[in-house]
Image: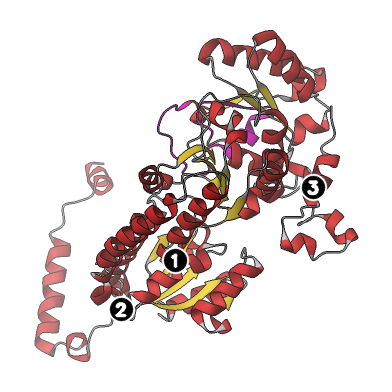
Amino acid sequence: MHSPTAKIQDVFDEPGCEINRGKDDKARKEGCSKPLTPGAAAGGCAFDGAKIVLQPITDVAHLVHAPIGCEGNSWDNRGAASSGSTLWRRSFTTDLTELDVVMGQGERKLFRAICEIKEAHAPPAIFVYSTCVTALIGDDIEAVCKRAAEKFGLPVVPINAPGFVGSKNLGNKLAGEALLDHVIGTVEPADAGPYDINVLGEFNLSGEFWLVKPLLDRLGIRVRACIPGDARYLDIASAHRARAAMLVCSTALINLARKMEERWGIPFFEGSFYGISDTSEALRQIAKLVVAKGANPDIIKRTEALIAEEEAIAWKKLVAYRPRLEGKRLLLNTGGVKSWSIVHALMEIGVEIVGTSVKKSTVEDKERIKQILKDEGHMFESMAPRELYDMLSEQKVDIMLSGGRTQFIALKAKTPWLDINQERHHPYAGYDGMVELVRQIDLAIHNPIWCQVREPAPWEYQPTVKEELPDAQSKTETAHAFAKVVTQQPPTASATLEEGR
Ligand code: SF4
């Protein structure tokens, strides 16, 4: 089996990452986070990261070579959506038992599983994931995949990112490497054209890329491959013929974007579809890059016309929310590009940004936050749950936007909360996505439940002095009435039995 060590060192040495370039050789070799201890890793492992990046490829069968827990941990943990095949949501695992490990049955079981999947589902490809247990017992998934690919005549791709090699982010990058090594460039498209682009690091959460794609369609730009959101195997296999690329989530797939530029001359830029001005800027950059690669320059003018039209529609819709949201205080506890890209539009309609987390933000992200908020005091690295609870329960915030992990702090503090991370149920990308986000904020803040839950519970109710001290006569009447009711109670079953004896 090939050790992933060389690949990991290659990923750690990423010229496209500014933080990485700022390190000395020793720090670079150590990577971005400490490797995890086998058995001590709980979720968020490299395998999990690889699965996150690859599972949204919808027509591929994703086979996890492991005891069943690994698949349970990683299955469908993002709300990505598919416009076609549902095979990606099937759970395939070799379900290795202790006996299989002791008897050395892992590779045999894996081969049989590939055969069964091929017979039952005939997918265009099977991705096979190694995990802590199967890597530690030395199962050679590359050899098994190679043999199965020859025998069954279909691509069987080894994803060598066992959990213990590092963090989820490292797993994201190792998934990108697997695509580079085994998938991208293996199919030549018959219809390559000057308006073909790739979108990298877009996961189509809650189907939000479908709010952006119609804009590209109107410009005549074809998305050859969106990796991984709503992707098909053949799209990715022919992605090397795109003329330009947009990198949406740079921390996940920067290595993929850089290497595609080096190998196939596909220029890329980093952008975001969150927020109005960012969506416009992304469209402008795409148009500029395709023109540089041979598209008709009139696309630049058409792009500006589309931006003007769409921005006007979006602002008109947003302004309608101003009277309801003006002055509302919002805490953004998410990080990354969202820490600033949606802030501008929210501020425009009068929302006050109390704070924004910069935990996962890059140096550029932080710079942009400073420019937009004009005050560094609004940025925080991370907040302890206790501190966050205090802030929310003292009602210093009208709504918190965050991921599911902190939702119960907000709910316990009786504060409106909106999921803005990967498990969210609403699409927030593009112009329409921004309007949807503001609509959801409005719905959350003005939900009548908050008035009710903030009322004291009946058992916490403090009666007024008058209520507490009825006059002597009514007190006596109440006591007599109570005694009467008690004496008129029917006998209990046990009392009846006693009497019968
Ligand atoms: S790969 Fe390792 S760390 Fe990841 S879920 Fe499986 S056992 Fe846990």
| Residue that mark 2 sits on | 326
Secondary element type, mark 1:
loop
Residue 342's tag is 1
- Amino acid at circle 3: Thr
Q: Where 433 falls versus 68 (above or below)?
A: below
Instruction: Bin the neighbour count of mark 1 within 10 Å (Cα to Cα): few under 14, some 14-19, many 20 and up.
Output: many
Q: Is residue 173 magenta?
A: no
Q: Is residue 84 magenta?
A: yes
| Residue that mark 3 sits on | 37
Which of discs 3 and 2 lies nearer the camera? The answer is 2
- Amino acid at circle 2: Glu
Q: Is residue 180 left or right of residue 316?
A: right
Q: Residue lying farthest right?
A: 26
Name the residue at 81% across, 17% down.
103
Instruction: Bin the neighbour count of mark 3 within 10 Å (Cα to Cα): few under 14, some 14-19, many 20 and up.
Output: few
In this view, the residue in front, 177 or 161, is 177
Range covered by the magenta-colored residues: 57-86
- Do we see residue 35 in this rendering? no
Q: Is residue 36 left or right of residue 29?
A: left
